Image (spheres, rainbow, N blue to C red):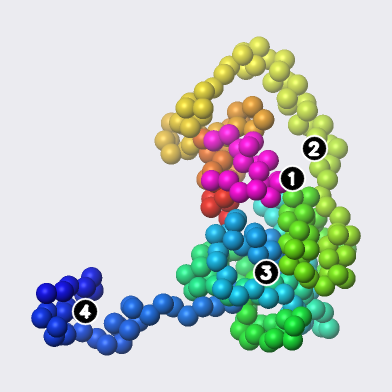
Amino acid sequence: MIYLKSSRLKVRDQHVADYDLEVLIAEMTPSSPVWRFGYGSNIGLATLRKKKSLNPSQFLVGTIAGWDLAWKSGRLAHVEPAYAGVRQAAGAQLHGSAFRITAEEASGLDRQERGYNVVPCRFVAYSGEVVEEVGLYVPKTPIGASLHEPKPSLRYLRLMQRGATEGGLAQDWIDRLMAQTHYVTPLEVRTQTEQWIAEFDADPLRESLLWTAEELAGHDGSADSRLAHTSVMGYVVLIHPGCRAFGAWKGNDITRRWLLHFNGASSIFDKYFV
């Protein structure tokens, strides 16, 4: 006697009874793979594998016609002020990588890239191979032409440059990325930060107050009586209730995580930073 875990299938003494063949085939057949196109942080194969936990069965580099690289504003103004985006442009060629992944992997990646719509496009590899219906991530909020586009952080720009170089994108595209300027924190912002630190150090009550990691962990925002806090460079900081923050920030020291992030390394918190 054999039982399979299915509400529609029961096998008893080698006789199949009461099942829907189409449902059975759907349950036992892996979903068809799909294609996605990377032009920002998803260009490089190493990044897809290590930081995105994807396992592409095929990886190609090439272009999608009619689209050009643009920059969309990020939600962390002085940390990640801009991310890669695209806008339609006649005669333009968007360079990047097309990678083939499972439908489940694509669904997870789409959730991470929830600020974008997936638009099917025709991809042409440098080798001449053509792939139809490659999913291009297009910002949900269209990016218009502007003389004052936001600039990406040095970390994000390096990730794109490294991915383009390792992937073997066209040299003129790599040159374009290398020539892109990155965000630099304005002097007034640095001055304000230094002022707050000086005020903290001058206050004996606050300066002498120490929190353990366990105490910080108890302020993850899960209890109404304990507002969420984080720690950066040894300073414990209250996360304003109206501030959008990654879950991994709350109740944790994020210094090491951001140093790893800046240098392109992975950490156990990567899955929370989407």
Q: Amino acid at mark 2?
A: Val
Q: What residue would you read off at disc 4?
A: 8
Q: Spatial distance from mark 4 to mark 2, Cα to Cα? A: 63 Å
Please give left or right for residue 135 compared with residue 94 in the image: left
Please give left or right for residue 212 compared with residue 59 in the image: left
Q: Position of residue 91 (x, y in %)?
A: 83, 83
The mark that comes first in sequence, 4 or 2, is: 4
Q: What residue would you read off at disc 3?
A: 38
Q: What residue would you read off at disc 2?
A: 189
Magenta part of the chain:
252-268
The mark that comes first in sequence, 1 or 4, is: 4
> Please, what secondary structure does the residue beneath circle 4 have?
loop
Q: Please give the label number shown on residue 78.
A: 1
The mark that comes first in sequence, 3 or 2, is: 3
The mark that comes first in sequence, 4 or 3, is: 4
At horizontal 48% and vertical 26% (from top left) the residue drawn is: 215
Q: Position of residue 163 (x, y in %)?
A: 73, 62
Q: Position of residue 123 (x, y in %)?
A: 69, 82
Q: Locate the N terminus and report the quarter of the image it occupies.
A: bottom left
